[in-house]
Image: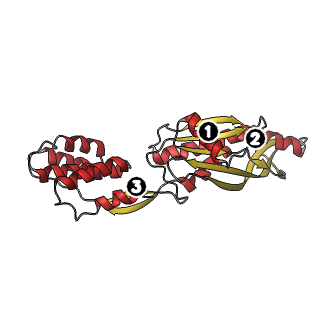
Amino acid sequence: MNIQTRQPSVSGLDLTGKTISVVYTDDAGRDSTFSAYVANGFAEALEEDYFDGKEAINVYKMEKDKNGNYASRDTMLNLVMDTGDDVIFLFDSPKFGNAKVGARQVVAGKDKNSRIAQVAIPFQINLYVYDALGADSVRTFKGSSTLREAVLCNTSDTDDQVVTKVWSELDEVGEKTGKNSATTFLSEWADETMYFIYYDAPSTWNKAAEEAYNFQWQKAINDWMTLLDAKDPERRSCAEYNIAGALYLLGDYDLAKKWIDLSLRESDILKGLPLKNKIYSKLTK
């Protein structure tokens, strides 16, 4: 089978099979609302990629420590202990620059005093990442962008009043910022050739092969498991090999290693296929 397999993200971080928490700091300012939307948008993007869109990532609010060092391993390790998750993404509170209010445009269909003003507010935000199952260090990602909003106002509104209205309309732009921030951590994909073996009888071999062809890996594994009592060690080896291949594609490399090792102990008929090297290469990264 020619299959697209998940690879680490462009950041080098591999989130496959790991539990994740997203944390944002709250300094009781208006930017805290923006941070909440950023964190939720970020979590949704990761869930879409790694968890088929299911809600699997917890989002937490943490009071900002003005003297805190979020790039500290101890700080992030404490969050790992508190959340119980493998990977922590921590958004620090954003730093906003001076807002610029553009020329006010007449709004068709509104009263003569209604206007639309384009507001641009530059900001910077730091994201700290710690993978308890990876390198024992905190990585820092610094980002900058501009918050842009079209604000409905009156001719009598001052620029400061126009800018104030922006802070009540942060949901869409905040979520978009979070999703854009997540792109660095989304999976890369690569084409791989995988081999699965089946016999003419019993019919379970063919059934499992069809399930594998349709990417129904758990069903295929369940069927291959029923074939492990075969008297022929070669057949047992093939069933174990197939299970290892399915687990590899599911991202459970530790368990896949156990099955491929068992398969090759049963019989060396499959030793020429590259699955063992694929699995071991994942475990050494």
| Location of mark 2 (residue) | 31
Side of 117 where 62 appears, left or right: left
- Determine the residue positioned at 34% across, 56% down: 279
Mark 1 vs mark 2, foreground winner is 1
Q: Which quadrant: the N terminus?
A: bottom left
For marks 1 and 2, the one nearer the N-term is 2
Kind of residue at disc 2: Asp
Side of 122 where 81 appears, left or right: left
Q: Residues within 10 Å of mark 2 (few under 14, many from 20)?
A: some
Q: Is residue 149 above or below residue 25?
A: below
Residue 271 x, y percent position in the rendering? 22, 62
State how far apart marks 3 and 1 are (Cα): 26 Å
- Determine the residue positioned at 24% across, 40% down: 222
Residue 135 x, y percent position in the rendering? 54, 54
Judge whether residue 40 can be spotted in this image: no
Of residues 245 and 158, which is closer to you in this image? Answer: 245
State how far apart marks 2 and 3 are (Cα): 41 Å
Kind of residue at disc 1: Asn
For marks 2 and 3, the one nearer the N-term is 2
Query: On residue 33, which mark appears?
Result: none
Of residues 204 and 166, which is closer to you in this image? Answer: 204
Of residues 153 and 109, which is closer to you in this image? Answer: 153
| Location of mark 1 (residue) | 78
Circle 1 SS class:
helix
Q: Quadrant of residue 38?
A: top right
State how far apart marks 1 and 2 are (Cα): 25 Å
Circle 3 SS class:
helix
- Residues at circles 2 and 3 in contact by the CB criterion of under 8 Å: no
Q: Tell me which colouring the rendered structure shows.
A: secondary structure
| Location of mark 3 (residue) | 283
- Residues at circles 1 and 2 in contact by the CB criterion of under 8 Å: no
- Determine the residue positioned at 83% across, 44% down: 163
